[in-house]
Amino acid sequence: MSTIGGAVRAFGRSKSGNVAMLFGLAAIPLMVGVGAAVDYGRALLVRERMGNAADAAALAVGSWQGQTKAQLQVKRGNTSTRTFRRRFSALPPRSTSISLETTSS
């Protein structure tokens, strides 16, 4: 056990190799920053594609005439799920909630 303690003390007193030690310490926050940037970029991509899927479902529901609200909700769910999976198949779709309001003209 004394050899390990002596090696640690010798390492702490050593003046050579400081650049490698500083690089190693600086690499930690650098890697955290890169990981955060990748995660944030991926989250933005998912948000954009989910919005596109919801827009496609809304446009599709608007084009179907003469159907009940329940039928429109089923078709809306199928359309948004299918659109999201086709454009972004790496992640499973989460359930979305889109409310439908019918107007009589």
Image (cartoon, rainbow, N blue to C red):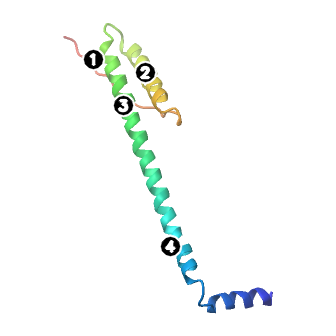
Residue 78 in percent (x, y) is at 46, 20
Amino acid beneath label 2: Thr
CA distance for labels 1 and 3? 22 Å
CA distance for labels 4 and 3? 40 Å
Residue 6 in percent (x, y) is at 74, 91
In the picture of the structure, the residue carrying the numbered disc 3 is 52
Nearest to the eye among marks 2 and 4: give it: 4
Amino acid beneath label 1: Thr
Q: Residues within 10 Å of mark 4 (few under 14, many from 20)?
A: few
As rendered, which of 69 and 83 lies closer to the eye?
A: 83
- Residue 57 in which image quadrant: top left
Q: Residues within 10 Å of mark 3 (few under 14, many from 20)?
A: some
Nearest to the eye among marks 2 and 3: give it: 3
Q: Earlier in the sequence, mark 2 or mark 1?
A: 2
Q: Are marks 1 and 3 in contact (CB under 8 Å)?
A: no
Amino acid beneath label 3: Asn
Residue 2 in percent (x, y) is at 79, 90
71 vs 94: above or below: above
In the picture of the structure, the residue carrying the numbered disc 2 is 79
32 vs 41: above or below: below
Residue 69 in percent (x, y) is at 36, 15
Q: Earlier in the sequence, mark 4 or mark 1?
A: 4
